[in-house]
Image (cartoon, helix red, strand yellow):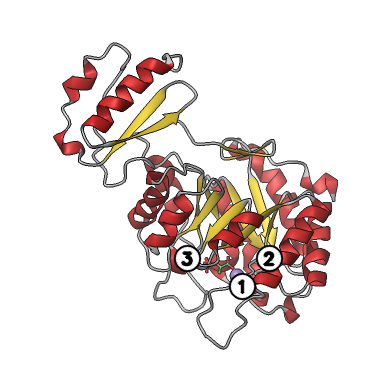
Amino acid sequence: MKLDTPRDSIEKVKNKISERNCIPHEIPGASKLGIGITGPTNLLIEEEFQTMDCVEEVIRVTKPYKLVSREMKNEDTIIEINNLKIGGKQLSIIAGPCSVESRQQLFDIAGELKELGIKFLRAGAYKPRSSPYSFQGLKEKGIEFLLDVKKEFNMMIVTEAKDTKSLPLISEVADIIQIGARNMQNFSLLEEVGQLKNIVLLKRGLAATIEELLMSAEYILSQGNFNVILCERGIRTFETMTRNTLDLNAIPIIKKQSHLPIIVDPSHGIGIWDKVHPMAMAAIACGADGLMIEVHNHPDKALSDGYQSLTPKNFKILLEKIEQLAPIVDRKIASYASVG
Ligand code: PEP
Ligand code: MN
């Protein structure tokens, strides 16, 4: 429909969809207003909508994922938060330790990142670990520290929701709720974050195909939350020299299939701190909308993922490199290097 379609015409279309036991999803774009339809759409007759004056075009989406697809919305989704844009020309950089370990640790790292101009601070309070004997996160205490650090430094918080039980607490502190790789197909968790307003960062599963990642995103959008950022973080292959295999193929493929922003986490992708720079650069070069980088002030003492964490000093060097690369791929990055 045209962007300036009057409200009553929009409602007429939506009512018609509901009367046929389907669900209408309003998807405003920059040039058109889309109404996504899910449910038993095989029973819908295109002509019934095509003949309505206010309807410009009826497109049947053939892909198994609908709302996340480019067919549904051609232009890139740009998520706005506190005057910042995620997606579009601006590169978004999320940085911070793997886990919240103590108030001091979190404040020290956040302080250093703030000085580098970082707006999104990551740190897990609930950690899904392969071993039950590994550090599981500070849980409620970690959330308390995250609330404090958010107030002190006015940074946006990215933190993981490990399960539906901790989700209400997480949603109070998280500007961006991270759904970890191990939870990519936790469908009840996906449905619950789909009902929230928070932005969701959905990480690709360890052995998930690109289509499965998009289907998982579809779960979230289908519940009404369109603020989803995808994240490529490496997949499991036969390779043993790296922690995972960072699948940068996924970036241009997803860009073709979906309007959602996608960022790359090279820290988990390669799992070796001194190989993070080249993979981060490669991610930006191939079209990622941003990066998530693990940064720790004492990587050797980190309670999780120290081996893949950059020191703030080394992270600053990466930001300077990204700043030089960005204009070559027609991207912008806030002047991090000059801030630091
Ligand atoms: C993390 O970001 O620290 C994390 C646990 O990531 P993933 O879910 O991708 O393994
Ligand atoms: Mn980690």
Q: CA distance from mark 1 to mark 3?
A: 18 Å
Residue type of the residue flagged with mark 1:
Ile
Q: Which structural element holds mark 1?
A: loop
Question: Which residue, given by chain and number where applicable, does mark 1 sit on?
Answer: 272
Name the side, left or right, on which 169 lies relative to 310: left
Q: Is residue 91 above or below residue 123?
A: above
Classify 10 Å Cα crowding around label 2: few (below 14), some (14-19), many (20 and above): many
Name the side, left or right, on which 247 lies relative to 317: left
Residue 210, image quadrant: bottom left
Q: Could you tell me if residue 333 is visible in this image?
A: yes
Q: Position of residue 185 (x, y in %)?
A: 38, 63
Name the side, left or right, on which 257 lies relative to 98: left
Question: Which residue, given by chain and number where applicable, does mark 3 sit on?
Answer: 181
Residue type of the residue flagged with mark 3:
Ala
- Say which residue appears at 75% left-offset and 66% top-offset: 145
Q: Nearer the viewer, mark 1 or mark 3?
A: 3
Q: Nearer the viewer, residue 122 or 37?
A: 37
- Say which residue appears at 40% left-offset and 72% top-offset: 237
Residue type of the residue flagged with mark 2:
Ile
Q: Which structural element holds mark 2?
A: helix
- Say which residue appears at 58% left-offset and 73% top-offset: 127
Q: Earlier in the sequence, mark 1 or mark 3?
A: 3
Q: Earlier in the sequence, mark 2 or mark 1?
A: 2
Q: CA distance from mark 2 to mark 3?
A: 21 Å
Is the distance from the Cβ of mark 3 to the nearest ligand 1 atom less than 8 Å? yes
Q: Which mark is residue 169?
A: none
Q: Is residue 328 above or below residue 103?
A: above
Question: Which residue, given by chain and number where applicable, does mark 2 sit on?
Answer: 143
